[in-house]
Image (tube, rainbow, N blue to C red):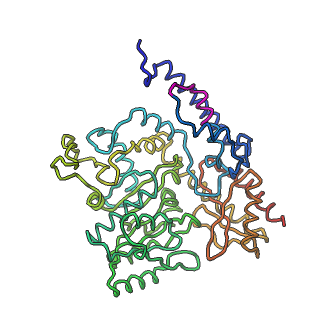
């Protein structure tokens, strides 16, 4: 049988696949001991190992004319992956993690191997239906109307960009030079970045003050909107946090939704971190008012524990999203979209390329659909409830330490703390002592001009034993001078 250079035969496919599966199995099995199992050559929790010149040189080398052995290349990948913060492990508590469910990785292997094009529904209608089904379920979960829809993106940043473009087009039309949008200092920086990419000047972004508990001040927002209208500006968008990235704080969604409706503003909710807690009873109560949103950003690579690179945008009215993104060309064959004219659409399914900036896009539906179907929604609900319990446990435990100050209880699963009476330098040294243990990774942020440390508890692999170990390390580090 003829073997072509770029097409391995069945036996070679099995051999390559088995080698990759063996590596993945060893890696996932080792995560139960990460980041302290010695697989990394550096301080495991921080990834601040000394560079390996030979490894760097091998990775930067140009590809050879002749083929290389897969085992050698797999070893290089493994060495490169080890030189990193262990984001997949249970002790990664410094930032909102991307969990990396194994089943989602299998879904990616299947989807990439089949290599179907799903930018247009006509080219793979049933796979488009699979992706559309996930989005419809999410719309129902957030109690959006039948007109709602959306798309799966590469992450919250791209979802936010599409939301802002849709809001700009829907509320301002073609002339948006006088438009203004409103967010708080706790809003993720991707919103201001998206506004700039969408063509809005920096002066269009208005930063609304927060209350003492870090929630957007609805009364202050109302006053700013009124002042901008009086000055001849055109307010069009209000951005609220459903769990801010740095502190996990939830804005008063009900009050802000009513303000947006009263003022005719597009109401956008950033639920990239906290949105999937909607699956739980406590989360639904905390996120009360989210159903009034015109758009919601979610990150399944956070709250559904999927691999990095999976975001979701939901919109109240799919037509608004399509009106802002659909570019079907002028039909004259001069570089427009006329070459796609033979691919007739399906009225039951959306063309995802018409709802966002991408025509070429990978099939993202299976990575969400397969874990939900295989494990069941109940497993995800239970895991999210566990994270809420763990955060409450961590907060109560740290609050009993007289050396520590906890400025507020967690809204969701992020716990903020600092040394009582310590200045910023002392707290940064405190953080260094915690991470130097190699058994936990924490991080810091700055709120009100003060450094705060954080535990972000959201990995599906993080359980009570891991949190208790982290708490012991924090208490010990707080006792050190």
Q: Of helix, strand and loop, which mostly describes the magenta segment?
A: helix
Q: Nearer the viewer, residue 384 or 156?
A: 156
Query: Is 133 above or below relative to 298?
Result: above
Query: Is 298 above or below relative to 73?
Result: below
Question: Looking at the picture, how far across and down is residue 186, in whole percent?
Answer: 53, 70
Image: magenta residue range: 65-77
The magenta stretch spans residue 50 = no
The magenta stretch spans residue 76 = yes
Q: Residue at x 67, y 69 (%)?
A: 452
111 vs 233, left or right, is right
Question: Looking at the picture, how far across and down is residue 344, in whole percent?
Answer: 20, 42
Q: Quadrant of the N terminus?
A: top left
Q: Residue at x 50, y 72 (%)?
A: 251
Q: Nearer the viewer, residue 215 or 379?
A: 215
Residue 268: quadrant of the picture: bottom left
Which residue is most to the top? 1
Q: Residue at x 29, y 66 (%)?
A: 169
Query: Is 89 above or below relative to 234?
Result: above
Query: Is 116 above or below relative to 6?
Result: below
97 vs 120, left or right, is right
How many marks overall? Answer: 0
Q: Residue at x 58, y 53 (%)?
A: 97
Question: Looking at the picture, how far across and down is residue 66, in whole percent?
Answer: 52, 25
346 vs 35, left or right, is left
Q: Nearer the viewer, residue 65 or 351?
A: 65
Question: Looking at the picture, how far across and down is residue 204, in whole percent?
Answer: 40, 75
Q: Quadrant of the C terminus?
A: bottom right
């Amino acid at each position: 049988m003829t073997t072509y250079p770029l097409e391995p035969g069945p036996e070679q496919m099995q051999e390559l696949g088995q080698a990759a599966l063996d590596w993945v199995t060893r890696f996932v099995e080792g995560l139960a001991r990460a980041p302290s199992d010695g697989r990394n050559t550096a301080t495991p929790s921080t990834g601040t190992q000394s560079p390996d010149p030979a490894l760097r040189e091998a990775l930067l080398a140009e590809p050879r004319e002749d083929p290389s052995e897969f085992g050698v290349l797999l070893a290089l990948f493994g060495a490169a992956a080890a030189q990193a913060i262990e984001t997949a492990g249970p002790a990664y508590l410094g930032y909102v993690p991307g969990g990396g469910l194994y089943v989602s990785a299998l879904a990616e292997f299947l989807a990439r191997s089949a290599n179907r094009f799903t930018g247009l529904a006509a080219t793979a209608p049933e796979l488009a239906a699979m992706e559309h089904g996930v989005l419809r379920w999410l719309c129902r979960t957030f109690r959006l109307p039948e007109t709602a829809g959306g798309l799966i993106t590469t992450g919250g940043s791209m979802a936010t960009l599409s939301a802002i473009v849709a809001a700009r087009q829907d509320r301002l039309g073609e002339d948006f030079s006088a438009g203004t949008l409103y967010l708080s200092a706790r809003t993720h920086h991707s919103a201001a970045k998206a506004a700039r990419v969408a063509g809005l000047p920096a002066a269009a972004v208005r930063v609304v003050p927060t209350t003492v508990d870090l929630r957007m001040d609805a009364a202050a927002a109302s006053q700013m909107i009124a002042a901008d209208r009086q000055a001849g500006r055109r307010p069009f968008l209000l951005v609220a946090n459903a769990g801010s990235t740095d502190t996990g704080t939830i804005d008063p969604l009900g009050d802000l939704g009513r303000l947006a409706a009263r003022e005719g503003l597009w109401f956008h909710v950033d639920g990239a971190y906290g949105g999937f807690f909607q699956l739980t009873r406590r989360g639904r109560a905390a996120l009360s008012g989210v159903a009034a949103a015109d758009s919601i950003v979610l990150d399944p690579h956070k709250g559904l524990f999927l691999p990095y690179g999976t975001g979701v945008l939901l919109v109240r009215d799919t037509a608004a999203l399509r009106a802002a993104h659909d570019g079907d060309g002028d039909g004259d064959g001069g570089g427009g979209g006329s070459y796609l004219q033979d691919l007739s659409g399906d009225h039951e399914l959306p063309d995802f390329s018409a709802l966002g900036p991408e025509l070429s896009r990978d099939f993202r539906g299976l990575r969400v659909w397969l874990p939900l179907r295989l494990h069941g929604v109940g497993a995800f609900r239970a895991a999210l409830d566990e994270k809420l319990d763990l955060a409450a446990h961590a907060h109560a435990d740290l609050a009993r330490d007289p050396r520590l100050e906890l400025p507020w209880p967690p809204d969701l699963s992020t716990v903020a703390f600092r040394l009582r009476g310590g200045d910023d330098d002392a707290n940064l040294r405190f953080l260094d002592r915690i991470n130097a243990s190699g058994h936990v990774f924490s991080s810091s942020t700055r709120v009100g001009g003060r450094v705060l440390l954080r535990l972000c508890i959201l990995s599906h692999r993080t359980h009570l034993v891991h949190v208790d170990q982290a708490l012991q390390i924090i208490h010990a580090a707080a006792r050190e001078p």
